[in-house]
């Protein structure tokens, strides 16, 4: 199982706000190229998002399903990417003095990749998920800063002169 960790400079709730918006999926998931549909119930357990993976013309239409949702601590997804297979992705957060620590665990659960030794699959998954966490941090931290700024009523607190 590939495990990748990053410190975010925002609370866990900001991370889960991004995860709860299925339309942001291609903005932070490396390889996802477009969204086609998000269930109205997203991110309830069993809800789905339909997305595409790859670069045109080699685009595969697939989906991701919510397996577990315990915001703002833990989310589990099953991502389908056939003919490669399916992966289980666990996103966990824990509070930290500077924001939160976010950890992604990912491993193949169905299809050909589940038979490839993890010695070969984990390093590329770690690289991919480092970039995914970088993108997710950009969205979550930016949203948190913007939300915090909008909530302040005193212009001096916002840095205005």
Image (tube, helix red, strand yellow):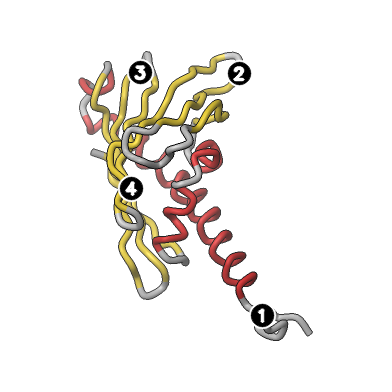
Measured as percent of width and height from the top left, residue 90 is found at 29, 43
Report how far apart the C-alphas of labels 3 and 2 lie in the structure.
Answer: 17 Å
Q: Which is closer to the viewer, label 1 or label 4?
A: 1
Say which quarter of the image contains residue 73.
bottom left
Q: Which is closer to the viewer, label 1 or label 3?
A: 1
Measured as percent of width and height from the top left, residue 60 is found at 49, 17
* Local SS, label 3: loop
The numbered mark, 1 or 3, whose residue comes first in the sequence reads 3
* Residue drawn where x is 29% and y is 38% of the image: 106
The numbered mark, 3 or 2, whose residue comes first in the sequence reads 2
Measured as percent of width and height from the top left, residue 76 is found at 30, 41
Q: Which mark is residue 56?
A: 2
Q: Which is closer to the viewer, label 2 or label 4?
A: 4
The numbered mark, 2 or 4, whose residue comes first in the sequence reads 2
Q: Which mark is residue 153?
A: 1
* Local SS, label 2: loop
């Amino acid at each position: 199982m590939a495990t990748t960790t990053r410190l975010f400079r925002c609370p866990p709730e900001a991370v889960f706000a991004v995860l709860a918006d299925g339309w942001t999926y291609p903005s932070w998931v490396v390889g996802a190229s477009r969204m086609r549909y998000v269930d109205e119930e997203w991110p309830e357990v069993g809800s789905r998002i339909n997305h595409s993976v790859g670069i045109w013309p080699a685009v595969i239409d697939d989906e991701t399903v919510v397996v577990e949702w315990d915001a703002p601590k833990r989310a589990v997804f099953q991502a389908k990417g056939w003919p490669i297979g399916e992966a289980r992705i666990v996103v966990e957060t824990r509070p930290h003095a500077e924001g939160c620590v976010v950890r992604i665990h990912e491993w193949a659960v169905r299809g050909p990749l589940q038979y490839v030794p993890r010695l070969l699959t984990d390093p590329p998954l770690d690289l991919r998920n480092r970039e995914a966490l970088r993108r997710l941090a950009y969205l979550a931290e930016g949203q948190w800063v913007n939300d915090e700024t909008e909530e302040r009523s005193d212009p001096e607190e916002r840095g205005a002169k």
